[in-house]
Image (cartoon, grey):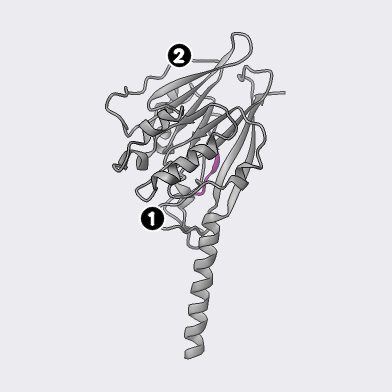
Amino acid sequence: MLWLLLAVTAAALLLYLYMRYSAQNDHLEFHTIEAESYPGNEPLHIFFISDIHNRVIKKATLSKIENIDMVIVGGDLVDKRTTMSQLKHNIEALKKWKVPLYFIPGNNDHELIDYDVVDILESENVQVLSNGDATIPMRGEKKIVLSGIDPYFLKPRRHMYHIKDRHPYQILCVHDPYVFKQMNKVDQQRFDLILTGHTHGGQIRIFGLGPYTRGGWFSKYSRPLLISEGYGTSLMPLRLGTRAECHLITVRKSR
């Protein structure tokens, strides 16, 4: 009986250590999106990361990426466990490429009351898209538009999201993919690329089952939709059957 108890205890300990490791083992995912509507002659390189929560971004992971054009943080940059020093470290880490840095708030950013995330980010020259848009100029008169939906209304002074007229190429970032799925078909079709997070892929999956489906790429009205499994974790620093991930997305014109 004693050996059985020891075996179960050892197995539980090994499982716990594996789940801790999985939550800290970064996966840098590379994706290429080809679109006829993309107006640029040169590819657009986007670093996308979401659901950082209480993690400190590993500089070793970022060092694998040399040249990018923009950084998009898709919400839950912080949660109630995140210290000011952790936030400052992560902002500085994401500014390493000296390219435009955009932040679209998530639910945990909205719930934090210890300090004002938006004020800190704006003081660091991070562009916060809380129901707003950013125009990204290309060569000549061409441009693309990045739109950020914030259904949590992080600040009362920020206006309700207004979808702009159709542009040659429009990227949407919204923390929760459910928000995009609830949009009407006409509004959904305005966007060429949709970036989301929030679900963590279920974070802990038992025999493949979890509260959410796994993350990945999905097609909605022929538009590529990314649901990232996120970089950090909520509640417990554990993962099982999911991955801690961030993404390098290359957008280029269809050949």
Position of the C terminus, as image quadrant, is top right
Q: Residues within 10 Å of mark 2 (few under 14, many from 20)?
A: few
Q: Which contiguous range is marked in magenta?
A: 214-218
Q: At which x and y percent is residue 92? A: 51, 38
Residue 50 in view of the camera: no
Of residue 128 and residue 186, the one placed in the foreground of this image is 128
Of pointers 1 and 2, the one earlier in the residue sequence: 2
- Mark seen at residue 165: 2
Judge whether 160 appears above or below 84 on screen: above
Judge whether 229 appears above or below 106 on screen: below
Q: Which residue is mark 1?
A: 235
Of residue 100 and residue 218, the one placed in the foreground of this image is 100
Residue 125 in view of the camera: yes
Judge whether 79 appears above or below 161 on screen: below
Q: At which x and y percent is residue 64? A: 66, 42
Q: At which x and y percent is residue 239? A: 49, 57
Q: Quadrant of residue 38?
A: top right
Judge whether 120 appears above or below 85 on screen: above
Spatial CA span between label 1 and label 2: 40 Å
The verdict on residue 157 being magenta is: no
**Relative side of 8 to 67, left or right:** left
**Relative side of 31 to 57, left or right:** right
> Which type of secondary structure does the marked residue at label 2 adopt?
loop
Residue type highlighted by circle 2: Asp
Please report the residue visible at 49 percent of the width from the left and 67 percent of the height from the top. 16
